[in-house]
Amino acid sequence: MSEPILIIGGGVAGINCALNVANYGTKVYLVDDTPSIGGMMARLDKTFPTNDCSICIEAPLMYEVHNHSNIEILTNTEVRRVRKTNGMFKVRLVKKAKFIDEEKCTGCRACMDACPASLPDEMDGKIGGMRKLISMAFPQAVPNKVYINPDCRYGRMRNKGACVGGCVVDCSQCRECPIALCVAACKKEGKDAVRLWQSNKNIDLEVKSIVVATGIKDAPAPPGLHGYDVYDNVITNIQFERLMNAGGPTTGRIVRPSDKKYAHKIAWIQCAGRGLAQGLPYCSKVCCMIAAKQTIITKEHDSSVETLIFYNDLKAYGKGFWGFYQKAKEKGVRYIKARPYDVSEDPATKNLTIRYEDLETGELKKEEVELLVLSTGLIPSNRNQNLAKVLNIELDHLGFFKERDPLMAPLATNVKGIYLCGGATGPIDISESVVQACAAGMKAILTN
Amino acid sequence: MNVPEVVEYARGLKHVAFADEGKWSCSVDYLAKIKEAIKEHNLNRVVIASCTPRTHEPLFKQTVKEAGLNPYLLEFVSIREQDSWVHMGEPERATQKAKDLIKMGVAKAIFLEEGEEIRLPVQTDCLVIGGGVAGMSAALQIADQGFQTILVEREPKLGGLLNRVSTVSHDHGVMPAPEIVRVKATLVESHPNINVYTDTEIESLQGYIGNYKVKLKTNGKSSEEALDISTIIVATGMKELEPTGQYEYGSDSRVITQLELEELLRGMSGNSEPLYGTVSNRSLLKVKDVVMINCVNSKNETRGCCNIGCSISVKNALALKKLQPDLQIHILYRDLSMVKEEHFHLDEAKAAGIKFIRFPDDHYPQLVKEDGRFVIRVYDILLGKELEIPSDMLVLTTAFKGNETVGQIKGYLKVSANSDGFFQEAHVKLGPVDFPSAGISLSGCAKSPKNFKESCEEGMAAAMRVSIPMKKGYIEAEGIVADIDLTDCSKCSLCYKNCPFSAIQLDENKQPSVIKALCKGCGLCAADCPKECITIVHYSDEQLLAQVEAALEESPEKKILGFVCHWCALGGVDMAGVSRLQYPSNARLIRVMCSARVPIKLIERAFELGAAGVLVVGCEFPTCHYITGNYACEARMNRAKKKLSKKGVDPDKLWVDWCSAADGPKFANIMRDMVKQLNLG
């Protein structure tokens, strides 16, 4: 077998890249700095323009990766250092402690039931999603193992009701814990998988090429923008995605954060914050179709819900996207070419009034809705800055990874043997990510 | 549930030689125990009753294999997600259900047969159809691996659409298109592993992965021998949809398309003469007022956004401005679909003095001639009034369509294309450069209009896809495949027509046979075969029937017999389990790979045995792991209902529903509703 390849990032791009390279017969290390592979796609509800269920089409690939003899998955693992010598990359990885013996954990979740403390979920917090201090990334997580919030283990969750709060000894000093309820629950199940004293582990690899598939991030709404963080019922489009997901915190019920009641009239503001100081200076490509999808699904849940989309330019750039937009309109979604400039809340009903300029008539108008969704766009992943330094590759002026010559050598970076795919290159949809994943995999294989 | 009681029950079942329980049967120590037991008791079938096959079947398959047993002799029963986790409040019923599920598993296991992965050899010859940028990119990647590549181009010269455009980027620093073609074509033509055939068309093409035979026709002369080809990349590109008759295009030479403008610009830059010069030799330098109208023939009832028109219009407007800075340019548009960094090019264009006017979707600009002079009348949305713009050159940003060879290639390869002649990929999201049949890939503008960079990437991606079987030397299918017994075959060719993967071929006598390596085992053909001569290995009628009969042996009047597809429906069932959603315990589920596997006769049999209800659940539309299986299932279930009512069975006792893998709550609700409506509470 030829020399192995390192893929950084286990989202849909990394997974597809790994499967292609591994099926070709090349060994792959698939590294992800979160506890599970799956990335952004694993937590979406549907995918445009077909409304395919996101996890339904991704999970089989995740299992395939898991069971593939040529792929080694390293979750919760960061790339710390990379040196290139004799054409090979010497890579130092750090596997951050999950405080779990992954060999022993069977994913039974008894520890989760036992854990007394919860925190707002990193993605679902705003809409009520909670996560135990010991938890599974999501139900279909691969590997299907739990992990412990490091803050719990370091004693920082005492005021949140963590059970280890009563102990004065640092966990690293013990090999047994008489206090932690997760430890006890695990032992009661006949397994002894919780390892509060586990430490980070260095892993050294030597690979011939590297594919960066670190993905993209949904832009947080600038505080105060259209009432975000001021009024309860203003959420971002990714939060809405979680709201309509049967696997999300509301089991797919589209309810308002303020009173958990069904929303009967919902508005989307596209390009939210674009051009403002804290907003994005560019178009994120996918938000128009995300909004079309979300309104269609909302209408499919309950056709009586009124939906309106304030937008400026419609991006229906891909195959079948225009038809998808037409479908939304047929379902009764109101598209309004408009510039919203103000949102205010009725304190009694928590409804929101949006004032906007209708671009077609120039008139100032207003509209009262029960839930407001902000399409904030996509921004570079937090990982990019640091990873660019570690890999010695460049970022562009927006913070995405830079291609050496996008036209003549697409997906190649300024370092020979390091390639890009997916959201690491900029805003992108799933199918384009898959195309790039295959292409980057090909280049990585051909590196010698 | 009472596990020891379940084990005791299992031990007492006919044919069971050994039964044991383990708290964590997937742990390393217990797997070793399983292997020991197989050897010690000389077991020839294994039934695992534990979590869900969706996650753990490969592990147990591997385990029995390591114990020296054929992995297809394993049957997996889900008593956690389908039972203990969802019936927590009724341990007795849960215990009873576990017994039934295991009995069903054992009943099927008795009929299990050894299976094996099926291999089809694949050599390393690839045919790339189309010598544009996608085709050239693909060919280079394949040839670099040492594989023989045949690149066929209809035109006399490689380059495709690049031979007509001036530049591929707004950035004037990058290579002009003719230079890119020269560089790429030199790489391709000088590559020892690439045979380039220009002026060449495909005369005939038949076969399947590893076994294609292709005949070429160069300069009208047919090749004598057919070439042996293993894999194919389709990169036939696209062409402009001529806006004949619109805006006097075709009758007034001042009206041109963007591509024709590209040719003029190309001529101006002195690189080469326009290849196909449909435009007269009017000098661009004499033009004073250029108007571009975007979305001509796009975004209407029949056609969507062309993806690249907006950025092409901005790019060409900037090129004109560079040539002649005092030129007046208006771009009339509906939406500016400028994504990612293209937005900065828009700023550049505005700074250069190019004017943008937005017109309403349903009110296109009009061309008016005054004394032979052009005036474009357009309603400006932002100003809220109609403007008249003088013009001496009108550029139409028109839509695109697939090449005229699409119809022919579609027939050769048994693939589909849309009404505009763009090929249909295997899966919009996850199979963007694949066709449903193995060994053929799709790339570039043959799929849909795209820019230069995206076409390069697709070419590289398509190369990746076809290189996998060529590198391995074979393709492999899981042992779950169709098998045709021709004894009763009536040669109706239904199986041939219905197979979504072109895995069934007909010989001269219309006798079907399965190309096993291409078969995915969905079972659509088997369930619809009027003579019942097709069986699916590992999901045979015999095995499924044994499960049905075992499930309904005791108190069938209280039971719901369910068929769930492996991919989405079972995912929904598992999700209900993981979420600990509690629902009534009446269902006994049988796993099939696809809902299309469920034949009407099994449903009839279940009702004959007295089942209270039958449930069939497949993937939510339009998702289907087997492309169209759920559609086939839906049609068949409608027929089943009619048949049932003729037989005097209430057709409402047959429930057909669709679930996604996230639809735990939906599945639980189906269960509750069924129990309620069938009065099983």
Image: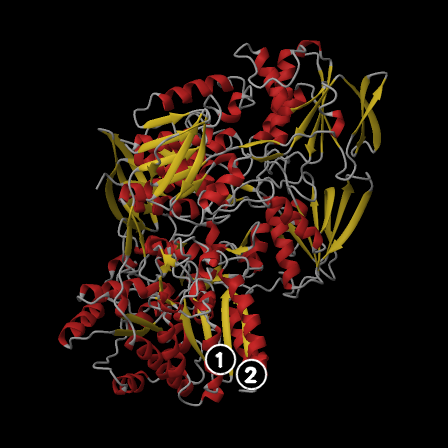
The chain to which mark 2 is attached is: B
Whole-percent x, y for residue B496 in the image: 44, 57
Q: Does residue B204 sit above or below B594 in this rendering?
A: above
Mark 2 closeness class: few <14, some 14–19, many ≥20 residues within 10 Å: few
Quadrant hosting residue B18: bottom left
Q: Is residue B522 left or right of residue B351?
A: left
Q: Which residue is mark 1?
A: B604
Quadrant hosting residue A139: bottom left
Q: Nearer the viewer, residue B45 or A196?
A: B45
Q: How many marks?
A: 2
Mark 1 closeness class: few <14, some 14–19, many ≥20 residues within 10 Å: many
The chain to which mark 1 is attached is: B
The answer to whether any part of residue B312 appears in the image is yes
Q: Which residue is mark 2?
A: B647
Q: Does residue A401 sit above or below A30 in this rendering?
A: above
The answer for how far apart the CA atoms under marks 1 and 2 are is 9 Å
Q: Secondary structure at mark 1?
A: helix
| Residue at image coords 47%, 40% | A423
- Outermost residue on the bottom side: it is B555
